[in-house]
Amino acid sequence: MSLLNDLFAKPLEPGYEEVAARERAAGVDTSAAGRRRFSPILIVGAAALGLLLTIAALQVQNNAAVVSSERQGLIDRIRAEDERVSRLQDNVETLESEISGLEASLLENSAAGRQLRAEVEQLQARAGSIAVTGPGVVITIDDADPESFDNPELAAVQDIDLQQVVNGLWAAGAEAISINGQRITSLTAIRQVDNIVKINYRPTQSPFEVTAIGDTRSLPSEFGDGPGGQWLRHFDLQFDVRSEESLEIPAGNTSLLHAQPGEAR
């Protein structure tokens, strides 16, 4: 529409206006009577051009409205699915807690049951199927300085950065790890789609808070000097490591679909 306004407000190019000003200064008649009138073809052409520009502008506006409406619809659907998944995960955690309570009450009736319960809890903690608590470290990771990269998108924390941090923590002696509240297990996927990092198929964003339970006397230095810390420093990512005497890591929520327990050997 601004193009149409410019056409009607200034029908002549600046060069033509300059020539007309010179002619007026030289005493040349520049009035409509002193010049040839516009031909009907030129008038019709100008009107047709204005009509085409108006139609094009309206079409662009309509397309923009349709695209915006479709985008908002997709955003609403994604949010609704995320909320549904969160509710289902809460239900799973509630049911798992009830099952654990029933198992504990049944196994407490005998010494053999109590021993079996302790062994089961150890296995569940290692598998990530139950929440765990203990001392450890919290590593906060944020994007690097965008001005240090030709492509600013490369300054963001990538999925491979988090993978290297997790591997570095395991190598440093971590016993349980979570990222932004998502438990890391053998079934965890850390993937990136359209610049969005997903952990356990849940979208997350910077800053990333990585919680690891382990020996606070050795874990910070082992991680900092190991491959995890070296990776973060190599790519100039901002990170901070602090020790905590009491941390809690939630249970994992990735269930087995096809694997079944085998016979013990």
Image (cartoon, rainbow, N blue to C red):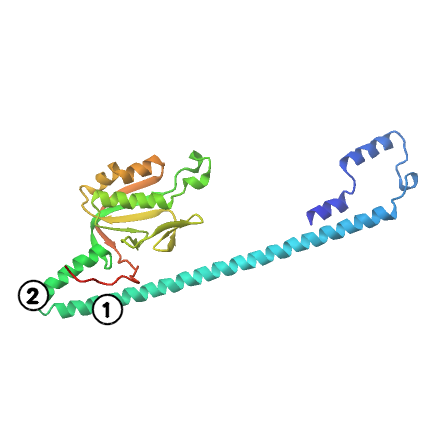
Tell me where residue 25 sits by quadrant: top right
Residue 126 placement (x, y as % from top left): 21, 55
> In the picture, residue 262 is in which quadrant?
bottom left
Residue at point 14% right, 70% down? 106
Q: Name which residue type carries label 2.
A: Ala
Residue 263 occupies quadrant = bottom left
Tell me where residue 137 appears, x and y as whole percent.
Answer: 24, 46
Q: Label 2 belongs to which residue? A: 111
Nearer the camera: disc 1 or disc 2: 2
Residue 130 percent across, percent down from the top left: 23, 59
- Characterize the local packing of mark 1: few (<14), some (14-19) or many (20 or more) Cα atoms within 10 angstroms: few
Rounded to the nearest angstrom, the CA distance separating label 1 from label 2 is 22 Å
Residue at the spot x=18%, y=41% of the render? 218
Q: Report x, y in % for residue 152.
A: 45, 39
User: Residue drawn at (24%, 54%), measured in percent from left and top?
Assistant: 248
Disc 2 on helix, strand or loop? helix
Q: Which residue in the protein does label 1 denote?
A: 98
The kind of residue tagged 1 is Glu
Q: Is residue 35 left or right of residue 135?
A: right
User: In what element is the residue under mark 1?
Assistant: helix
Question: Residue reaching furthest right?
Answer: 33
Image position of 124 (left or right of 194): left
Residue closer to the observer: 38 or 31: 38
Instruction: Judge left or right: residue 244 versus residue 43.
Output: left
Residue at figure coordinates x 18%, y 68% from the top left: 103
Residue 79 sits above or below residue 21 on the image: below
